[in-house]
Image: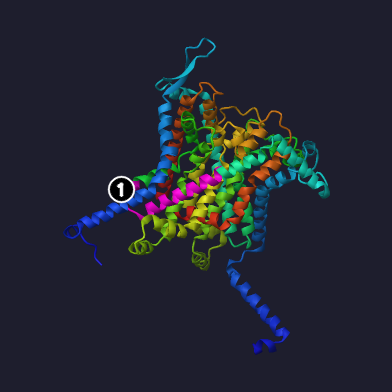
Amino acid sequence: MTTPTRAAMKGRGVAKRSEAVKREERTGWTFMVPFCLLFLIVFVVPIIWAIYQSFFQQVATGGGAYGGGTLENKFVGLANFQYVITSKAFWSGIGRVFIYTVIQVPLMIILALALAMLMDSFIVKHVSGFRLLYFLPYAIPGVVASIIWVFLYNQQISPIVKFCELFGLHPDFFANNVVIGSMANITTWTFTGYNMLIFLAALQAIPHDLYEAARIDGANGWQIAMKIKLPNVRGAALLAMLLSIVGTIQLFNEPQVMQTADPGISDSFTPMMMALNTSRGSLTPKGDGPASAIAIVMALIAGVLAATYALVERKVNES
Amino acid sequence: MSQANTMSRQDRRALRKAEKLRDKAANELPPSLRPNKFVKALTILVLVIALIYFTFPIYWAIIASTKSPSQLTNSNGIWFAVGLDELPDAIAKNYAGLLGWTKGKFWRWVLNSLIYSGVSAVIGTVVAVMAGYATAKFRFRGKGVIIGVIMASMLMPAALLTIPQYSIFNAIGLDNTMLSVIIPCCVSPFGFFLGRVYAQSSVPDELLEAARIDGAGEARIFFTIVLRILAPAMVTIFLFMFVATWNNFLLPLMMLSSTDLQPVTLGLYGMVSLATFTDRGALMMGALLGVLPVIILFLFLQRYWKAGLAAGAVKG
């Protein structure tokens, strides 16, 4: 079978052919439209709206010194961005999230990878029960998980604290420099099983002849894990890492819930909390303008981080 | 038949034993692959420690859901405070406490969660599969750009969108309605990705051609043939979208001000953030009842979420 060249097609039924192409195009778009429409409403329009809003601030006009009057959108140029970029609270929030990401993401990925490797190592046979129970926390909403852990961190009721006291330890999970670790633990608890299952799926896709060949060549279990399994799940691990980094940038549920038990957690503890509380008016300057500016700067930082990560990953891959 | 009848009992037992041995040998690893005892013990130890870490909080929540505030502080944290025969009473008491703290709205919240998750997952799944099918099986202008944009949006910190989304819904008077939670949850780039991968791998072009030659319209082909083939994929997408909406906290927190519209996560958060709140046992009862639907869904649909994770792992 030879494919007809363009010239040959011109001779016969060019009209018919282009009719078919047009129809295919129409059908394809028809199936695309519902998703695209929703995508526009949920993703594209809000992004444009946020950019537009970030140049405005709501100010009261016509009122006296004690407010009153009506709120009016006033164009303020880049003032909102200037506020965000010079805001100490914003950068401390970014700093906290950065520390959180640097500690929590690698720890979780390594833990998930290690568990997946152990389960795939044939050392233990009946792993499906373990697998299901490791995954269970993923089914528990972040808010509920945070509530449970906040109670488990509580001095009066926590069996963990009581257990530590047997050994003369008095852990304070809400102490200033510990609280980020306590939060990171909640996230790790929720998502390790999920990542482990992704890695397990990748491991199980490796053809088993490879292992036997390696055995014949005299490799031991450890060598097989490091030289065959690890390289084969690298892609999945790097992707999981990237998605986890994007996830932790928007850190919100855990600190928001922990705030109910620890007044030391401020309204701007993470940038996401700061954006919410700015938009709701419990931080000044308030309103959608400054909140949008916070969101945009965060998105830019996230983009730079993700791009840097992807670049470094490619460099490492090449070498 | 006669042979079986004449076989003595001893023979039959021997046969069964041989079969068992054969089965065992088939599952057994070659001797060179068998781990030594120490490695095996160590592995089991690690797996069990991890198991305790992942399940202990849930276990504790179950125990705590039967306790009164004073029992939570004073009794042994890892076992019930009352005898097993008194347990039903303790549970009933905390259940009554839960309904009291939530002003009788607890089940309304669970129903809200079911509506938000169910409706948005159904719409989102159909829409995502349609789009995935379109990009997998049709050529049209702008396809490459669209795929690129949707894939890139997977890397977008989605929570950031909630603020402008709220601002827009507020401007058009749709905030504090069920739609304000449902609409943003209807779009899942991950769902699109799964739909595309499955359509590429499991819908044969020949089948579509044959249906077209038989004179079936494109809509009919999609709804009667393609959807049937993609049914397992749709369950997977539905499950992931359902859970994502159930777990979403920021969106309803921003959009909803009426307690009648709250999903169960927001309701429980409201309870714990009350200044007067004391009854942790009742709250734990609510937390457990509130996650039950998701856990049941996961248990019954195990093979579907495993399939979804596998697609993410291998194609990703």
Q: Is residue A88 above or below residue B106?
A: above
Residue A174 percent coordinates (x, y): 66, 33
Circle 1 SS class: loop
Q: Is residue B248 magenta?
A: no
Q: Is residue A239 visible?
A: no
Towards the viewer: A214 or A131: A131
- Horizontal side, residue B291 vs residue B129: left or right: right
Q: Which residues are magenta?
A: B116-144
Towards the viewer: A198 or A96: A198
What amino acid type is highlighted by mark number 1?
Arg
Q: Is residue A286 visible?
A: yes
Q: Is residue B117 magenta?
A: yes
Residue tagged by mark 1? B141
- Horizontal side, residue B6 vs residue A304: left or right: right
Q: Is residue A73 above or below residue B300?
A: above
- Horizontal side, residue A169 vs residue A295: left or right: right
Q: Quadrant of the N terminus of chain B?
A: bottom right
Residue A189 percent coordinates (x, y): 62, 45
